[in-house]
Image (tube, rainbow, N blue to C red):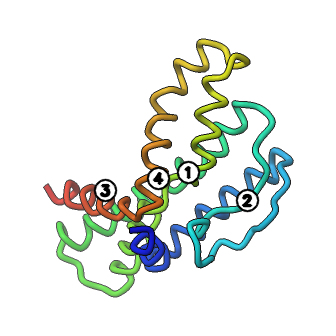
Amino acid sequence: MKYFGSILKFLTFPGMFLHALWEHLICILYGSNVEDSRAIRLDELSGHVEHDFMDTPGKQFLLCFLPFLFNLILGLLLSGVAVAKIFVLGEKSTILYVILWVGASLLSNLFPLVEDAMFMFSEIYSEKTKLAAKIFAAPIAAILYVGAYLNMYGLTVFTTAGFLALCLI
């Protein structure tokens, strides 16, 4: 099943590359050591940057959440516009199909690496994290945690297809 995920990563390489770019920029911003910045790889790290874990729970949360948020917003904008123009307005052009593919690839590559999500979850629920932060971060962290496993097996392509189908309703 992981092979399916790897194949889908390569079919959705714009989203994979942008997710790695966001992650790399956040590592630079917070001073985390980047060990391997190759976004395109032949393993489960494809689309992610190999880095040290962040030194605070908040930074680790942002490392997982911000690339998710950036890909989500950009993916929704691109795919939403393309779906509206292609399927509602009936416009047919190659550039609209490319925009739809890029938007869908962004939405298919939202989630962090499983190890990053697991560390984020353990940091959020450690004793050093305040109760208010735990309450705020819990639903987002749960989504990122589950999404990381979906992403590992390539199942986020189905959530993306479901979203695009909902746009048509």
Are the two marked residues, 3 and 4, in contact with CB atoms closer than 8 angstroms? no
Nearer-the-camera pick, 154 or 20: 154
**Upstream in sequence: badge 1 or badge 3:** 1
The answer for how far apart the CA atoms under marks 4 and 2 are is 17 Å
| Residue position for label 3 | 159
The answer for how far apart the CA atoms under marks 1 and 3 are is 18 Å
The answer for how far apart the CA atoms under marks 1 and 2 are is 17 Å
**Upstream in sequence: badge 4 or badge 2:** 2
| Residue position for label 4 | 72
Of the 4 image quadrants, the one containing the N terminus is: bottom left
| Residue position for label 2 | 24
The residue sitting at the top extreme is 131
Is the residue 97 above or below the residue 44 in the image? Answer: below
> At which x and y percent is residue 106?
47, 64
> At which x and y percent is residue 139?
45, 29
> At which x and y percent is residue 73?
47, 52
* Quarter of image, res 21: bottom right
Q: Is residue 1 left or right of residue 51?
A: left
